[in-house]
Every structure is written in C-alpha cells, then in structure tokens.
C-alpha cells in the first residue's frame, strides 16, 4: 500500500479487523469452537490472553 494515503489504510484495516470480529461472533452463534479460536487468535498481538487456549480446560468446571 502507498504510505501516503492514510485514509485508505484506515478503512482497509477497519474492514479487515471487523471481518475477523464478525467471524468470531458467527462462530459463537453456530457453536463452532475452531472458527472462534482461529478468528480470535488473529487478535493475539493486541491481547496476549487471546492467543492462549484455556477455554476447553475450564469448560467442564463451569
């Protein structure tokens, strides 16, 4: 991408991250754990906890 056009870069990253968030929400509604984990792991650089796989271990205790 051209480094001078910040508006296009902003919209590009907005739609990229919004698409990942939408995929995560669809995974929740469908009950598809693998889809949830793959889309949430894309956020791992932002939130270190998102990259860890702890939910299956905690699920039986809930």
Image: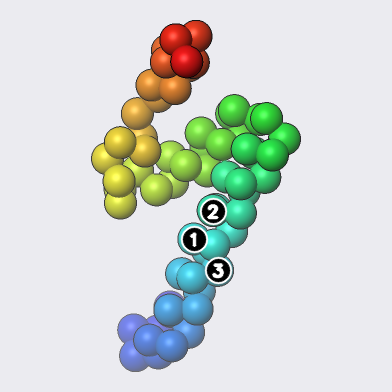
- From the top left corner, tell me how far across and down residue 14 is, in percent: 49, 70
Please determine whether, in this image, residue 49 is positioned above or below residue 9. Answer: above
Circle on res. 17: 1
Mark 1 surroundings within 10 Å by alpha-carbon count, few (fewer than 14), some (14 through 19), many (20 or more): some
Image location (x, y in percent) of residue 28 = 63, 38
Marks 1/2: CA–CA distance: 6 Å
Quadrant hosting residue 35: top right
Q: CA distance from mark 3 to mark 1?
A: 6 Å
Q: Residue furthest front?
A: 62
Residue 19, percent across and down?
59, 59
Q: CA distance from mark 3 to mark 2?
A: 10 Å
| Mark 2: secondary structure | helix
In the image, residue 50 sits, relative to residue 22, either above or below, namely above
Q: Which residue is mark 3?
A: 15
Examine the rendered structure and indicate whether residue 42 appears above or below residue 6.
Answer: above
**Residue found at the very far right of the displayed protein:** 30
Q: What's the coloring here? A: rainbow
Which quarter of the figure has residue 50? top left
- The residue drawn where x is 54% and y is 53% is 21
- Are the residues at dot 3 and dot 1 in contact (C-beta closer than 8 Å)? yes
- Going by the image, does 19 lie left or right of 47? right
State the residue at coordinates (61%, 46%): 25
Q: CB atoms at circles 1 and 2 under 8 Å apart?
A: yes
Q: Residue at x 55, y 68 (%)?
A: 15
Q: Nearer the viewer, mark 3 or mark 2?
A: 2
Residue 21, label in figure: 2
Residue 27, position as x, y percentages in the image = 64, 39
Q: Secondary structure at mark 1?
A: helix
Mark number, residue 42? none
For this view, does 43 lie left or right of residue 38? left
Tell me: residue 51, above or below residue 25. above
């Amino acid at each position: 991408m051209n480094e001078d056009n910040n508006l296009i870069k902003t919209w590009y990253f907005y739609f990229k991250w919004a698409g990942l968030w939408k995929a995560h929400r669809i995974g929740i509604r469908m009950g598809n754990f693998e889809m949830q984990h793959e889309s949430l792991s894309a956020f791992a650089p932002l939130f270190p906890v998102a990259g860890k796989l702890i939910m299956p271990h905690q699920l039986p205790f809930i």
